[in-house]
Amino acid sequence: MVQIYLAGKKPGRKMRKSFTLAELSIVIVVIGILAIIAIPQFSKLLEKSKAKEAFTNLTAIYTAERLYHIDTGFYTTDINDLDCFLRWQDWKLEEITCSDCATDFKARAERKSGPYVGYHLYIDQTGTIASNDGYPYTPE
């Protein structure tokens, strides 16, 4: 009796099915390309959500300042005078100032962590939120 063996297969051993090195390399390259495309987009969305923290808190300060102005006739520079609850995580309230507390105020928040550390956002008595140091995200 003549036995014929397939190349690479020894008698009595089962042939395993597996991926070749080339196939695995292609999969790794495709995953890498997808990561290169997705990570910057994710970073932008993450920073936008952190900017919303500042927008929300500055808007709360604006609303509380308006109510304080209605009650007293002037704006305050002391956050403890305002009836508002603020939750700061990636930002901090730098200061509330007014050149003439009967007519205007400006509150300033500073980014305290992440790639935009040190950037500032402002809100004034008109409710306008702005940045004068190039922070790229503004309220919509």
Image (tube, rainbow, N blue to C red):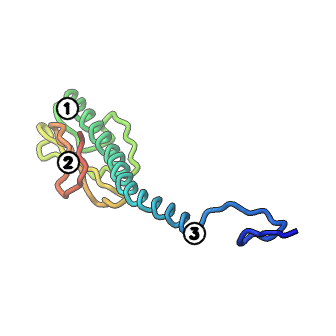
x and y percentages locating residue 102 in the rendered image: 13, 37
Residue located beneath label 3 in the image: 21
Q: Nearer the viewer, mark 3 or mark 2?
A: 3
Label 1 and label 2: CA atoms lie apart by 14 Å
Quarter of the image where one finds residue 34: bottom left
Bin the neighbour count of mark 2 within 10 Å (Cα to Cα): few under 14, some 14-19, many 20 and up. Answer: some
Instruction: Name which residue lies at 24% across and 29% down.
Output: 67
Q: CA distance from mark 1 to mark 3?
A: 71 Å
Residue found 31% across the figure and 49% down from its top? 93
Which label sits on residue 97?
2
Query: Regarding mark 1 in the picture, which secondary structure is present there?
Result: helix
Q: Is 17 in front, or is 115?
A: 17
- Tell me where residue 49 appears, x and y as whole percent: 36, 45
Which residue bears the numbered disc 1?
69
Whichever of callouts 3 and 2 sits on the residue coming sooner in the sequence is 3
Residue at 20% across / 48% down in the picture? 97
Q: Amino acid at mark 1?
A: His
| Label 1 vs 3, first from the N-terminus | 3
Disc 1 packing (10 Å; few <14; some 14–19; many ≥20): some
Please state the horizontal and vertical placement of residue 42, each as a whole percent of the image.
Answer: 38, 52
Q: Quadrant of residue 98?
A: top left
Q: Up-down: is 97 above or below 1?
A: above
In 3D space, how far apart are the residues under numbered discs 3 and 2 (Cα atoms)? 65 Å
Secondary structure found at label 3: helix
Nearest the camera: 44 or 4? Answer: 4
Evaluate whether residue 91 shows in this view. Answer: no
The local secondary structure at tag 2 comes to: strand
